[in-house]
Image (cartoon, rainbow, N blue to C red):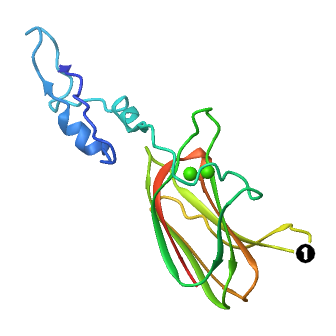
Amino acid sequence: MLCAPPMITRAMNLPTTMASLSTMASCSMAGPTTARIRSATPICRISDIATAEADIRVILPQDIFELNDTSDKPTNFGFFAGNTTIDKLTIAGHPDLLPDYDWYSFITAASGSFSATIGYLPNGGGDLNMRVFTVDANNTLIQIGASLAQGTTMQSVRVDVPAGIRILVWVYGFNFAEGTYAMNLSL
Ligand SMILES: [Ca+2]
Ligand SMILES: [Ca+2]
């Protein structure tokens, strides 16, 4: 029994299942006619095929707000109230190979329910996560919300805030994941 190697073709962002790969593996009973066949059903080993699940990354562009990698040098939106969506954002490793962290900051221009949501497309798997902070009188970060779900494409935080406080939103790749994302802020 001979098992031909599977043809593995995978397009970016199209998850390939072992089942679909196994259908690409072709089996035949060709071989010496004297060979003893132990099984009536040809079986292809797929243990190696599973490694085809390895993630494939592409080089993502740096977004327009770089560098905003630390909480003391965030992208500053000034006073904010309303609803805004910003797309074409990325968590993408920098040319110097350092990881990308995206920090955004603003002062609440009204009290109310603040929400931050990111919808993302992972770059070869993984998740982006989001944490929301305010700061105390000593400028120390105080986390007031977080969205750390795994195996998804959206994170969302909603929290009630007073007017006139600083809010910082931190978007980063869990375990150095990368991705393209859009962020919606509303207050
Ligand atoms: Ca970025
Ligand atoms: Ca950044």
Residue at the limit of the structure toward the front, as seen here? 78
Image: 144 above or below 128 = below
Q: Quadrant of the N terminus?
A: top left
Measured as percent of width and height from the top left, residue 86 is found at 47, 66
How many numbered marks does the figure carry?
1
Q: Residue at x 55, y 64 (%)?
A: 149
Q: Secondary structure at mark 1?
A: loop
Q: Quadrant of the C terminus?
A: bottom right
Which of these two is toward me, 168 or 149? 168
Q: Amino acid at mark 1?
A: Ala
Measured as percent of width and height from the top left, residue 93 is found at 57, 40
Q: Horizontal placement of 127 versus 104: left or right?
A: left
Q: Residue at x 34, y 48 (%)?
A: 13
Q: Is mark 1 within 8 Å of ligand 2?
A: no
Q: Horizontal placement of 6 versus 90: left or right?
A: left
Image: 20 above or below 180 = above
The quarter of the picture where residue 71 lies is: bottom right
Q: Horizontal placement of 17 versus 4: left or right?
A: right
Q: Residue at x 25, y 38 (%)?
A: 21
Which of these two is toward me, 21 or 84? 84
Q: Horizontal placement of 133 versus 185: left or right?
A: right
Image: 62 above or below 97 = below
Image: 58 above or below 85 = above
Measured as percent of width and height from the top left, residue 124 is found at 43, 43
The quarter of the picture where residue 4 lies is: top left
Measured as percent of width and height from the top left, residue 103 is found at 66, 59
Tag 1: Cα neighbours inside 10 Å, few (<14), some, or many (≥20)? few
Disc 1: which residue:
137
Q: Residue at x 30, y 48 (%)?
A: 14
Residue at the limit of the structure toward the right, as seen here? 138
Which of these two is toward me, 54 or 123? 123
Which of these two is toward me, 174 or 47? 174
